[in-house]
Amino acid sequence: MKFNKIFFAAIFLCMFSFGYSQNNTSIKSVVNAYIGLKDALVATNNEQAVLSANILIKALTAVNVADLNSATNITWSKISNDLINSAKFIQASNDISVQRDQFVTLSSNMYLLVKDAKSEVPVYYQFCPMANKGKGANWLSLENKVKNPYYGSRMLSCGKVVETL
């Protein structure tokens, strides 16, 4: 009987430790770096976009997969290289239109990651129908108010919130 109590106590502790260590804290820095890049594109600041992409690359390469829950880990394994490559492409370009074009792909993959990571704060998935050569494009924001990274001040409020994560 004593063995059963110890056995179940050990299982409980392992389960608690497992859940606690897999809370996706690495993803928070990725989201914050992504938001910095989005804000640079909203401001039409290609130099800041390069710097922000560099910060994003560092955050992406610092993700600890042991820190991720199982759903996030699966998504991460599928898209991490694409996220890093998109950020590197933005970092390598000084052309704001090229940076914005690449931001479409980056944002699509970030959506998948954030959706599985289940952020503690609301993350707004926003959409502009005119971006991406009229095909439309999405991005993530920490604020409900639309600030369009694809057009900046030319069409700052073009778009809408399509989902809250």
Image (cartoon, rainbow, N blue to C red):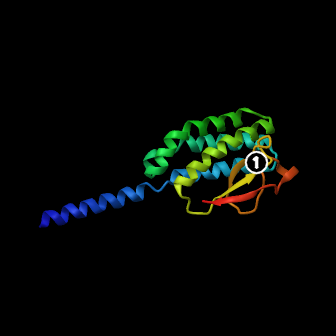
Horizontal arrangement in the rendering, residue 55 relative to residue 23 (left or right): right
Can residue 44 be seen from the camera position used here?
A: yes
Spot occupied by residue 70 in the image (x, y as percentages of width and height)? 43, 50
Q: Which quarter shows the N terminus?
A: bottom left
Quick one: label 1, few (<14), some, or many (20+) residues within 10 Å? Answer: many
Residue 105, picture quadrant? top right
Horizontal arrangement in the rendering, residue 96 relative to residue 109 (left or right): right
The answer to which of 54 and 100 lies nearer the viewer is 100
Inspect the image, locate mark 1, and give the three-letter code of the amino acid beneath it: Ala
Spot occupied by residue 37 in the image (x, y as percentages of width and height)? 71, 47
Q: Residue at x 42, y 47 (%)?
A: 66
Q: What residue is shown with label 1?
A: 40
Q: Residue at x 73, y 53 (%)?
A: 127
Horizontal arrangement in the rendering, residue 66 relative to residue 162 (left or right): left
The answer to which of 151 and 16 lies nearer the viewer is 151
Residue 20, picture quadrant? bottom left
Q: Secondary structure at mark 1?
A: helix
User: Which residue occupies the extreme left position in the image?
Assistant: 1
Spot occupied by residue 14 in the image (x, y as percentages of width and height)? 31, 57
Can residue 68 be seen from the camera position used here?
A: no
